[in-house]
Amino acid sequence: MNPIKSIVVMASGDGSVAQAVFDAQSKGVLAGLIKIEKVISDQPDAGVLNRAKQAGIPAITLPMKNFANRSEWNRALIDEVDDSNPWLVVSAGFMRILSPDFVNKFQTINTHPALLPAFPGAHAVADAMAAGVEVTGATVHFVDEGVDTGQIIKQASVEIHKGDTQVELHERIKIEERKILVETIKELVMKSEEQA
């Protein structure tokens, strides 16, 4: 059995998807497999920071406005993640495009609330509803230099019900996002142990 894998989680919002990883580390299928070294948010008032605190995970904020320009922020983010020397970076609703330097340095996965390659970008749930599709879903993918263009790892479908609001649909998608994110991390850990 290989040593526990170090992970950094990045999120911008409430952190309900990140919470699934926190729970899986403390008492679920990832217990004894991973250690979340820190949580990073670009939003000082993000709910994920409170969730991290409650889970006993160090959390830091890197607000874009604290830096002179985007390249300074990119460098600060790389340095902050590099401090933890993570085996994997998990973007769980981190609403920033990561620099090429970042994605070339760290193995990074992301959750997305649509069945990629359909509906990439920040408005995936609204875009799926506007397109009139009957099925959307959730995707976990590796992050590359594009916007939601990295290799797809795992997907789950979610039906769009007649009369759904965007909020209702997004909540159902998040249930699948949480599930497949935890499954993906476990599978990546197992795969890396087989290769070791």
Image (tube, grey):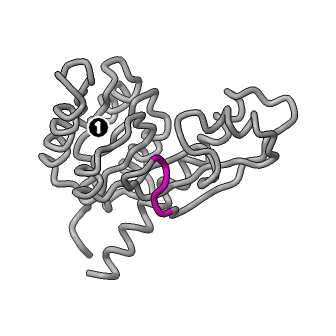
Q: Residue furthest right?
A: 162
Category of crowding for the residue at label 1, using alpha-carbon neighbours closer than 10 angstroms: few (below 14), some (14–19), many (at least 20): many
Callout 1: helix, strand or loop?
strand
Is residue 143 within the magenta segment? no
Q: In the rendered image, which quarter is residue 19 located in?
A: top left
Judged by its main secondary structure, the magenta piece is loop
Vertical side of 20 occupied by 73: above or below: above
Residue at the bottom extreme, as displayed: 195
Q: Position of residue 142 (x, y in %)?
A: 42, 58
Residue 41 against residue 85 in the figure, above or below = above
In the rendered structure, which amino acid carries the disc numbered 1?
Answer: Val
Q: Position of residue 91 (x, y in %)?
A: 39, 45
Q: Identify the residue under disc 1.
A: 39
- Relative to 196, 134 lies left or right: right
- Residue displayed at 29% across by 37% down: 39
Task: Tell me if 88 is positioned left or right of 68 in this view.
Answer: right
Quadrant placement of the C terminus: bottom left
62 displayed left or right of 163: left
Q: How many marks?
A: 1
Q: Say which of 119 and 1 sits in front.
A: 119
Q: Is residue 118 above or below residue 68?
A: below
Determine whether, in the image, residue 190 is placed left or right of residue 171: left
Q: In this rendered view, identify the residue nearer to me: 94 or 47.
A: 94
Front residue of 34/160: it is: 160
Tell me where residue 162 appears, x and y as whole percent: 87, 34
| Residue span colored magenta | 147-151
Along the viewing direction, whichever of 163 and 73 lies nearer the viewer: 73
Identify the residue at horizontal 38%, vertical 35% (top origin): 96
Q: Residue 26 in the image: x percent, y percent?
A: 36, 48
| Quadrant of residue 167 within the rendered picture | top right
Quadrant containing the N terminus is bottom left
Question: Which residue appears at 79% of the width and 30% of the height?
Answer: 164
